[in-house]
Amino acid sequence: MALTKKQIKQLRALSNSLKPLFYVGKNDLTEAAIKQADETIEAHELIKCAVQDGSGLTAKEAAAELADQLGAEVVQSIGNRFVLYRASQRKDIEHIKLVRE
């Protein structure tokens, strides 16, 4: 599911107030880290992530790899932080309503 420019703009605006919920550390993206990220994105749909200093990955590399593993979309990557979006299948959360073109 490719996001349109308007949808990316909407998600970027929503992500401004978010604090990082997932950190990529010195072990980079292990199976346990990917599982934790999957649970987090399923609960929130839009997550901000941060790459810590000890990691061998840049934010863009980590974002691309994690998005690929999770089936998510990279919304943006700035500095050592990046934002991912994936629609959740859960019924007990409030879903983000994306704008239509």
Image: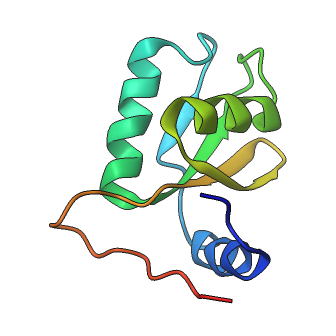
Q: Quadrant of residue 40?
A: top left
Q: Position of residue 17 (x, y in %)?
A: 57, 73
* 27 w.r.t. 21: above or below: above
Quick one: 48 or 52, which is closer to the camera?
48
* 3 w.r.t. 100: above or below: above
Q: Quadrant of residue 14?
A: bottom right
* 92 w.r.t. 61: above or below: below
Quick one: 44 or 19, which is closer to the camera?
44
Number of disc labels: 0
Q: Quadrant of residue 1?
A: bottom right
Q: Is residue 47 left or right of residue 50?
A: left
Q: Position of residue 60 (x, y in %)?
A: 81, 38
Quick one: 42 or 100, which is closer to the camera?
100
Q: Residue at x 70, y 49 (%)?
A: 82
Quadrant where the C terminus lies?
Answer: bottom right
Q: Residue at x 37, y 31 (%)?
A: 36
Q: Is residue 92 left or right of residue 59?
A: left
Q: Residue at x 78, y 76 (%)?
A: 5
Q: Residue at x 71, y 18 (%)?
A: 55
